[in-house]
Image: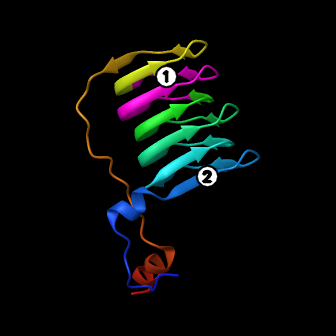
Amino acid sequence: MFSKGEKKSAEELSQTSNIIGKETVLEGSIESAGNIRIEGKVFGNAKAKAKFVMGNDAYVDGNVVARSGEVGGNIRGNIEISELLILKPTAVINGDILTNQLVVEPGATFNGGCKMGHLAKDIVITIPESRATERKIKRA
């Protein structure tokens, strides 16, 4: 494993993958410097500096922000993708889309507004301080 002082490069972080499994329910937001793949349910926002992927039976009740995306499930919220967004035939989107490029495959359902061709912006991932650090500050 890595020592406490060793830091990963931005390239290494962008290649990491986070998977929310098929029978998993996450209540809260998820942010990653790498990829996010959702097969289960997320009740909160999802933000990935790299790719966001949803399986056919996946569900997200919140906003999605990523560099690229491939959606096969159901999203109830807005989607902001700085590069390419692909809506698979099983996708159901109830919210607005902001993306540079959009592919809607036959069968996909999209209910909302769409703006395309916006300039790609840097996706900022916030890293909260640990609770241990919080406790030290409170005691001081």
Residue 64 position in % (x across, y down): 47, 37
Contact between marks 1 and 2 (CB within 8 A): the answer is no
Vertical relation: 81 (above or below) 47: above
Q: Which residue is mark 1?
A: 95
Q: What colouring method underlies this structural image?
A: rainbow
Number of other residues with Cα within 10 Å of mark 1, as a class: few under 14, some 14 to 19, many 20 or more: some
Query: What stretch of residues is rendered in magenta?
Result: 76-97
The residue under label 1 is which amino acid type? Gly
From mark 1 to mark 2, how far is it between C-alphas?
23 Å
* Residue 120 painted magenta: no
The residue under label 2 is which amino acid type? Ile
Judged from the image, the secondary structure of the residue bearing numbered disc 2 is strand
* Residue 95 painted magenta: yes
The one nearer the camera, 58 or 140, is 58
Point 38% across, 85% down: residue: 5
Judged from the image, the secondary structure of the residue bearing numbered disc 1 is loop
Res 33 visible? no
Q: Which residue is mark 2?
A: 19
Point 45% across, 86% down: residue: 3
Point 49% across, 41% down: residue: 52
**Label disc, if present, on residue 65 of the rendered structure:** none
Vertical relation: 14 (above or below) 98: below
Residue 44 position in % (x across, y down): 56, 43
| In this rendering, position of residue 26 left or right of residue 131 | right
Looking at the image, is mark 1 or mark 2 nearer the viewer?
2
Vertical relation: 130 (above or below) 57: below
